[in-house]
Amino acid sequence: MTKKTVRDIEVDGEKVLVRVDFNVPLDIKTGAITDASRIRAALPTIKYLINHKAKVILCSHLGRPKGKVDEELRMAPIAKRLSQLIDLPVSTTSDCIGADVEKTVNNLKGGDVLLLENIRFHAEEEANDPSFAQALAKLADIYVDDAFGTAHRTHASTVGVAKYLPAVAGFLMEKELKALGSILASPEHPFGTLLGGAKVSDKISLIQNILDKVNLLLIGGGMAATFLKAEGYDVGLSLLEPEKQSLAQELMEAAKRNGVSLLLPTDVMVAESISAEAKSEVVPITNIPANKKIADIGPKTIDLFSQKIKQCETVFWNGPMGVYEIPQFAQGTRAMAELLASLAATTVVGGGSTAEIVAEMNLAQKMTHVSTGGGASLNFLEGKTLPGVNVLLDK
């Protein structure tokens, strides 16, 4: 960890602007929070600041309001849930910048917590507009970034404010950088990576960056179809990225050169359509019907992947093994989640839908680390510099 954290800076009595990632999933009908894990993830930083009598000013986006006020995406319900979790009142504002907000901030006492209105109600946030960043910075003495999930975005609240305030990492940011950094820099071997999800193109840079670090690479999900096709198998009507087939072939050859065991499914679950009503069957990869598409990995693949993963000391997982939203196509993903949760190895789950699945199955506590950032964790493991991390003060 080369960046300063909130521990390395004097916060007592100071006004501290904290960028959190409270972009929680909401129930479409009721607007209720369906999973508060992102709020819980920020609690160590918030409680530390409260205990040090800082004036805590939290800011976050929620949903995609596209620079306009959206009544369904106001922060009040988030403030209410946070208040329950910290057992303290959390006040809100009707905007995130401006004279009224400044007045509210100036009335804060040490240990008070304020949650600003959705920062994406202003288009200037995503545009990283300097005057908007300055208006946010005007509210505080110190900036703390605890939103790893948005660290790959060059926005006013993740990058812009750091030009005007001393900027340090919160404890969640620190935890993420340490956990993901250690599997890149010093993983215990054997090191296995399990990749799924729909597209090969989403994972190319990641595969290229970790090929010289892993011993085992397992590929499932929709992306497996492109690899299978590159190997000469007929994949029926499965989702394909034809322009990525030659690259898939190159990656498999590179794995061989590096002594990496790269394994594809040996059997798959197929169906004529991806729907709850569709009839499905398990077939070997040599016998995928021309009128069907791959929807999940099959039982023999689950056994094969499980045997290999059990031999690993470090496992990184990103991407479901099938169409998880439909129960009959969720077996492969659920099996992998349960397996990882049962291991004594270091298990790191890379954000996004994979993190949501693990949380939904109540297995997050059984993993070594579940990342709160989908795009951010992938970018980091691809070896890219994250703009939101780059602007923080060095130790």
Image: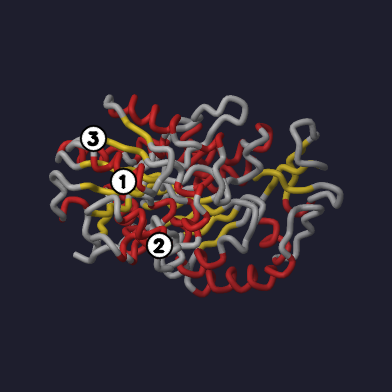
Pinpoint residue 24: horizontal percent, then vertical percent. Answer: 48, 38
- Residue assigned mark 2: 131
* Mark closest to the chain's N terminus, 1 or 2: 1
* 10 Å crowding of disc 3: few (<14), some (14-19), many (20+): many
Lower sequence index among marks 2 and 3: 3
Measure how far apart labels 2 and 3 are at the Cα level: 27 Å
Q: State the image coordinates of residue 378 (x, y, percent, origin top left).
A: 48, 58
Quadrant of the rendered structure where residue 155 is?
bottom left
Residue sitting at 61 percent across and 31 percent down?
A: 28
State the residue in front, 278 or 285.
278
Q: Residue under circle 3?
A: 112
Kind of element beneath mark 3? loop
Q: CA distance from mark 3 to mark 1?
A: 15 Å
Using the rendered view, name the quadrant where residue 56 is placed: top left
Q: Amino acid under label 1? A: Glu
Q: Position of residue 82 (x, y in %)?
A: 35, 31
Asked whether, in this view, residue 232 is left or right of residue 32, the answer is right
Q: Amino acid at mark 3?
A: Asp
Crowding near the residue tagged with mark 2, few <14, some 14–19, many ≥20 C-alpha atoms within 10 Å: some
Q: Is residue 147 above or below residue 281?
A: below
Whole-number angstrom distance, CA of label 1 to CA of label 2? 15 Å
The answer to whether mark 2 and mark 3 are in CB contact below 8 A is: no
Residue 102 image label: 1
Comparing labels 2 and 3, the label whose residue is closer to the camera: 2
Q: Secondary structure at mark 2?
A: helix
Instruction: Identify the amino acid type marked 2.
Output: Ser
- Mark seen at residue 134: none
Within 10 Å of disc 1 (Cα), the crowding (few <14, some 14-19, many 20+) is some
For the residues labelled 1 and 2, say whether their Cβ atoms are less than 8 Å apart: no
